[in-house]
């Protein structure tokens, strides 16, 4: 199986360490990873602002770059959702269908394709899990609290398999953190308040780390934590799993 | 005022925002408890969604069936193509009866039609009999929530208002005391009302009857004393069969307030001897909305308010920030159909978290519709900031690896956030309350080339 790794633009540019951790983690799990060169973006910042039409170029570039991969993995639920649901209709062809049906967010790739539910690693910290909305309600990588039925979370499952980790219970486990892409600047006041409340929830349960499946949400929270000099750290789940497995 | 600005003002009063957020979250939690007790919850939602989609897809037939059966039951049926016509019909009924006072229970439709000011202008006294609505009416405000219209007000404010309007004891804010005062004040209106107006939660094509759900019993109080009962309903309130109520009644109150059922679920079928029932079937843009391929499902709404209670944006910005009778997520997908330009900012008043769609008892894909409305706003040229920004340029850069590589290092952060910065004509919208991430020495792609792909 040839696995193509998609590292979204903001991880590439702002959090390369998350890209490196993802690559190393997949390799530790025995995956043959290829990183197609000249990747850019999934197009989401434009599409979510109403400019889906203007993403044809971006999407075409993405499709050409990844259509040779059997499977595509990305450490961002949000970008995976964009590719699965909001690629302009003009580009819906066989190549695109292949990508749509074979692109996975990192944790769902580990649990559903590699069929690994437990990882051999240790992480002795109190961790709060930020279930990014696009992973949770978009890709259904967990059950949202609004729905009835049995609770599950693919990222939570992987984290909880680590030795000595303590996953804290939050008051509002899956309320949005307030990032929302350009929402974070268009609706700055509400976005900030949502982030502040999310951090408060973690602090009141003595979390040391906020773990997330989307670096963009974590960037928003990290910006608030640093500004307010709070004692809390954000980590992408790839960084946690990769560190834990050394 | 735009939503983002109104929200900013709302958020200035931190204690109130916190309390507003908690009060509505509490409703969401109560709803969750109820949902967990009904094992077939998701099946019920599926059924509700399918029944509504079926009914809306065959609305013309069901409306005819309903009209025929209602007339057969002795109900007078009126058709109103818009708000103006609806208001005129109500006024004509009052005039014909020679009555100058209307007692009404909660009806979002009459708010939509701006019926109260219309009638008041013609010298009719309109008395809201739902407690929340009465508070709002006495304070000359607009409701901020469709189920809990005065949820934005604190009991101290209501105490003050009642002191002034109902002459209650000075400084007595005890909710029970205030409720009792409102009750005795309303009672005399109930007893003297000759015409009462209610909304409609569900109308049944098969029987020609309809159902009104309230917690205070005020709809019944008004109607039973009055000689004439006017029921105003949007045409989308129709369901085919009586047995379908078994689905909706189980979902409605659980979703709305976390109660298994509203205190009163009143079925109206035919007028009592010597009395009249009038039904007004209101279109007011609905049939046109129904023709919108991407957006017609919004008409499935049963107005439970759950999407407001769960919405992290609504809870932190208050209902008035939306500038329309129906606020929150559902309001933000109804308003663009009414006036795309005026309400162009509402589809953007969301982080697209999708909580609304998951909580909705009739499974409206609210957040997907918000996304689609954003596309419409752009395509119709209502993104005023778009001209000023480099957003289209960003699209070109991201489509070209060469440009992306060139701009990358310098423009790392601005690549994604430039548009937002420019909209506000200053550099620090992101950075007002948040730190900007420390820029790394090299990008992932640079690292990869250096370490893995030396060719
Ligand atoms: S859209 Fe759904 S959740 Fe919102 S008020 Fe309507 S029925 Fe209730």
Image (tube, coloured by chain):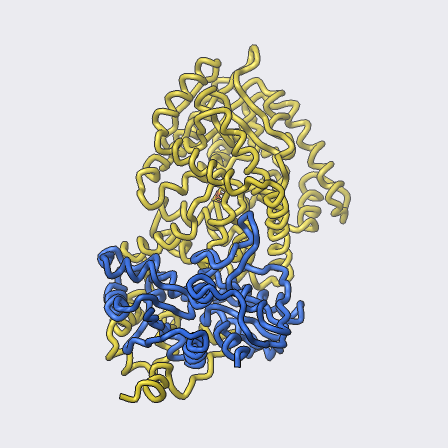
Q: Which chain is yellow?
A: B
Q: Pick whichever, B435 or B48, lies toward us.
A: B48
Farthest residue toward the top?
Answer: B273
> Residue at the spot x=60%, y=44% of the render?
B139
Q: Which chain is blue?
A: A
In the image, taking residue A164 as reference, residue A71 lies left or right, namely: left
Residue B360: % across, % down: 49, 45
> Residue at the spot x=36%, y=88% of the render?
B451
Give the tally of numbered discs.
0
Q: Please determine whether, in this image, residue B12 is positioned above or below residue B149.
A: below
Q: Please determine whether, in this image, residue A4 is positioned above or below residue B362.
A: below
Q: Can residue B349 be seen in this snapshot? A: no
Residue A78: % across, % down: 41, 64
> Residue at the spot x=51%, y=51% of the render?
B320
Residue A228 occupies which quadrant of the picture?
Answer: bottom right
Residue B270: % across, % down: 52, 16
Q: Can residue B179 be seen in this snapshot? A: yes
In the image, taking residue A245 as reference, residue B426 lies left or right, namely: left
Residue B186: % across, % down: 66, 31
> Residue at the spot x=48%, y=35% of the render?
B110
In the image, taking residue B381 as reference, residue B265 lies left or right, namely: right
Residue A8 occupies which quadrant of the picture?
Answer: bottom left
Q: Pick whichever, B333 or B429, lies toward us.
A: B333
Q: Quadrant of the N terminus of chain A?
A: bottom left
Residue B68 occupies which quadrant of the picture?
Answer: top left
């Amino acid at each position: 199986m040839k696995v193509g790794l998609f590292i979204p633009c903001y991880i590439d540019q702002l959090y390369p360490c998350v890209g490196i951790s993802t690559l190393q983690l997949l390799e530790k799990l025995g995956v043959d990873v290829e990183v197609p060169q000249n990747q850019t973006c999934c197009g989401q910042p434009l599409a979510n602002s109403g400019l889906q039409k203007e993403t044809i170029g971006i999407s075409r570039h993405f499709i050409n770059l990844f259509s040779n991969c059997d499977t595509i993995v990305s450490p961002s639920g949000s970008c995976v959702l964009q590719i699965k649901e909001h690629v302009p209709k003009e580009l819906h062809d066989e190549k695109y269908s292949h990508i749509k049906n074979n692109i996975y967010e990192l944790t769902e790739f580990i649990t559903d394709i590699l069929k690994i539910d437990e990882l051999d690693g240790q992480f002795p910290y109190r961790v709060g899990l930020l279930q990014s909305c696009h992973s949770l309600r978009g890709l259904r990588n967990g059950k949202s609290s609004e729905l009835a039925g049995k609770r599950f979370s693919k990222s939570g499952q992987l984290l909880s398999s680590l030795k000595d980790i303590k996953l804290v219970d939050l008051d509002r486990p899956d309320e949005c953190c307030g990032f929302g892409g350009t929402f974070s600047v268009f609706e700055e006041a509400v976005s900030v308040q949502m982030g502040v409340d999310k951090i408060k929830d973690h602090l009141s349960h003595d979390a040391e780390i906020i773990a997330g499946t989307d670096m963009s949400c974590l960037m928003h929270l990290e910006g608030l934590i640093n500004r307010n000099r709070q004692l809390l750290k954000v980590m992408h789940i790839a960084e946690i799993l990769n560190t834990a497995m050394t | 005022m735009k939503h983002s600005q109104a929200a900013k003002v709302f958020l200035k009063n931190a204690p109130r925002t916190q309390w507003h957020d908690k009060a509505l979250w509490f409703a969401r939690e109560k709803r969750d408890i109820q949902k967990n007790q009904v094992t077939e919850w998701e099946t019920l939602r599926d059924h509700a969604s399918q029944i509504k989609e079926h009914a809306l897809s065959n609305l013309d037939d069901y409306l005819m069936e309903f009209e025929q059966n209602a007339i057969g039951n002795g109900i007078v049926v009126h058709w109103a193509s818009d708000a103006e016509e609806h208001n005129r019909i109500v006024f004509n009924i009052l005039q014909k009866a020679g009555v100058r006072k209307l007692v009404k229970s909660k009806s979002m439709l009459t708010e939509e039609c701006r019926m109260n000011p219309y009638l008041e202008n013609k010298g009719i006294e309109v008395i809201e009999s739902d407690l929340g609505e009465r508070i709002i009416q006495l304070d000359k405000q607009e409701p901020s929530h469709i189920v809990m219209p005065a949820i934005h007000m604190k009991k101290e404010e209501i105490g003050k208002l009642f002191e002034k309007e109902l002459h209650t004891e000075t400084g007595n804010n005890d909710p029970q005391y205030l409720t009792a005062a409102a009750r005795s004040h309303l009672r005399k209106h109930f007893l003297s009302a000759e015409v009462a107006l209610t909304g409609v939660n569900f109308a049944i094509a098969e029987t020609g009857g309809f159902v009104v759900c309230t917690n205070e019993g005020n709809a019944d109080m008004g109607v039973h004393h009055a000689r004439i009962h006017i029921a105003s309903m949007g045409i989308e309130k129709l369901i085919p069969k009586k047995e379908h109520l078994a689905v909706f009644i189980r979902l409605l109150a659980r979703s709305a307030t976390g109660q298994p059922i509203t205190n009163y679920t009143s079925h109206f079928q035919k007028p009592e001897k010597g009395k009249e029932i009038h039904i007004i079937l209101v279109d007011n843009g609905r049939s046109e909305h129904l023709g919108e391929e991407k957006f017609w499902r919004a008409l499935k709404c049963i107005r439970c308010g759950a999407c407001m209670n769960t919405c992290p944006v609504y809870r932190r910005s208050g209902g008035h920030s939306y500038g329309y009778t129906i606020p929150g997520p559902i309001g933000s997908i109804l308003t663009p159909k009414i006036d795309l330009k005026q309400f162009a900012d509402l589809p953007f008043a969301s982080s697209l978290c999708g909580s609304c769609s998951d909580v909705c008892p009739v499974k409206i894909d609210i957040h997907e519709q918000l996304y689609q409305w954003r596309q419409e706003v752009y395509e119709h040229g209502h993104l005023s900031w778009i001209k000023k920004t480099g957003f289209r340029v960003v699209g070109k850069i991201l489509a070209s690896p060469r440009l992306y590589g060139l701009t990358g290092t310098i423009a790392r952060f601005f690549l994604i956030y430039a548009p937002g910065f420019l909209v506000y004509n200053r550099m620090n919208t992101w950075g007002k309350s948040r730190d900007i991430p420390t820029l790394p020495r090299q990008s992932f792609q640079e690292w990869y080339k250096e370490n893995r792909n030396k060719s």
